[in-house]
Amino acid sequence: MSATQDESIKGNRPEDAKLPLGKSFAYGLQHVLTMYGGIIAPPLIIGNAAGLAPDEIGLLVACCLFVGGLATILQTVGIPFFGAQLPLVQGTSFASVATMVAIVNGGGGIQAVFGAVLVAALIGFLIAPFFARIIRFFPPVVTGVVITMIGISLTPVAANWAMGGDAKAEGYGSLANIGLAAGTLLVVLLLSKVGNAAISRMSILLAIVLGTVAAALLGMADFSQVGHGAIFAFPQPLAFGMPVFEIGGIISMTIVVLVILTETTADILAVGEIAGSKVDSKRIADGLRADMASSAVAPIFNTFTQSAFAQNVGLVAITGITSRFVVAAGGGILVVLGLLPILGRVVAAIPTPVLGGAGIVLFGTVAASGIRTLSKVKYDGMNLVIVAASIAFGCIPIVKPDFYAGFPTWFETIFHSGISSAAVMAVLLNLLFNELKFGNTKNASVFSAAPPRMVKTEEICGLLEGDHYVGGKLIDKEGYEIPVVTPDEFEQIQTGAIEMPVPRLAGNPEH
């Protein structure tokens, strides 16, 4: 029985598939492990920037897990007007980290961060329905670019994880770390090749487990801190005091929210494309409202902006499990991890290089999904230059992170993300070349794709059944080379002015 047949109940949409409870939580755990490093990184960075004590940073981490789990359930299960009902994992957005650190360093402290997030999220909530109407400006030439850039933008994250995750740590970039990542990657590839569909689909989770076991045997995993700290703890609302509202921080965070809306829209479109499910403006609006409602509630529970995690879009692509209920199960696991810090400490002990090895496949799969979308694009007009310019523009902040350092902060915030850079460029160029028809001339640009190959009728009238072209020679079905002559030579042979070449077997000049 195939894995598809093994899925017990299917709705009218691919994402409505319901798997057995055990499988749902197993695949859900795979989603959690995939994004765990990304969801705990922001509270660790911001907590340290704010000078918080280790137990306070631990509280931030627990709150991020708890709220991320609730946000994931809202996004996947959905209620009227909230939730795209797609397999999207929600969590603390990394796009806002730089801005939040700047707010902390500006003297406002972490309370000013919470205030800025709260107000910016409410603004994002209000504009979400209008923002969703840009769906008509996201044809395959745009969505393909954005999905491809999601994968490309995440590749440096996987590389950093493979090197150890912390550039200041001892052994960062060592052969041991990279070797552990490579071993995990190899396990993913080998398990993906086995004939058993269940094992193949669980390849990421199994590889992470096996990679962690190998790391423990090699002394590269530390579980000594798992037993330290509380076993159960409910996130205390406003544990750091009331939010503080500063106009500068609010403006900066609102710009970040626009970036998050752009990236979440791209993720909704990407996972819809992967799942083969229809995504319209209403569904995008429901997803963005869930995103912003979760972000507005997050500061009350001591955490930050929420957004869809692009790496989990890659997991959906690589496993083929498009059920939103699987991701909802992962949201439930996140909630439990947020309530049981001891379990969170177990997952946190997974070595970062192991996550890096798995991430290489995951993030590459996202890029491949975008390339598949781009393969559906017709390149007979200006679409080639749209794709070329947008991907190159999106790669600028990836290959040269300080490229926008001299620009205004608001500009740098938007275009420092390769995803939003490519999205903005692709949308604008699509408007210029495909929506605004004035001045367009077919194939006017040197960047336009070349016309398809064509052969004149008279050029093939002399061919017979079985004739074929190999190694620069025309061969008949018996294996004899057919002489290829110029029009003048043909006329001379016909009149007897020159002799007709002797037929010979191909590859045997003496025959």
Image (spheres, rainbow, N blue to C red):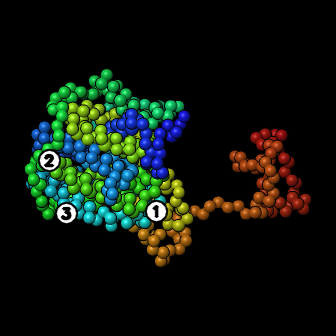
Residue type at numbered disc 3: Ile
Please state the horizontal and vertical placement of residue 347, each as a whole percent of the image: 27, 33
Answer above or below: position of 443 versus 188.
below
- Residue at image coords 13%, 37%: 55
Q: Assess disc 3: are there few (<14), some (14-19) or many (≥20) residues with their C-alpha within 10 Å of its C-alpha.
A: some
**Quarter of the image where the N terminus is located:** top right
Could you tell me which quadrant the C terminus lies in?
top right
Q: Is residue 338 left or right of residue 147?
A: left
Q: Position of residue 202 (x, y in %)?
A: 42, 34
Q: Residue at x 51, y 68 (%)?
A: 445
Amino acid on which the number 1 mark rests in the picture:
Pro
Question: Which residue is the site of mark 3?
Answer: 251
On the picture, is 494 further left or further right than 82?
right
Viewer-side label of 2, 3: 2
Q: Residues within 10 Å of mark 2 (few under 14, many from 20)?
A: some
N-term-proximal mark, 2 vs 3: 2
The residue sitting at 30% across, 63% down in the picture is 128
Q: Secondary structure at mark 2?
A: loop
Question: For this rendering, which residue is in front, 370 or 55?
Answer: 55
Residue corresponding to mark 2: 237
Q: How many labels were placed on the picture? A: 3
Q: Residues within 10 Å of mark 1 (few under 14, many from 20)?
A: some
Sequence-wise, which precedes: disc 1 or disc 3?
1
Q: Quadrant location of residue 231?
A: top left
Q: Position of residue 506 (x, y in %)?
A: 77, 43
Q: Is residue 59 visible?
A: yes
The CA distance from mark 2 to mark 3 is: 25 Å
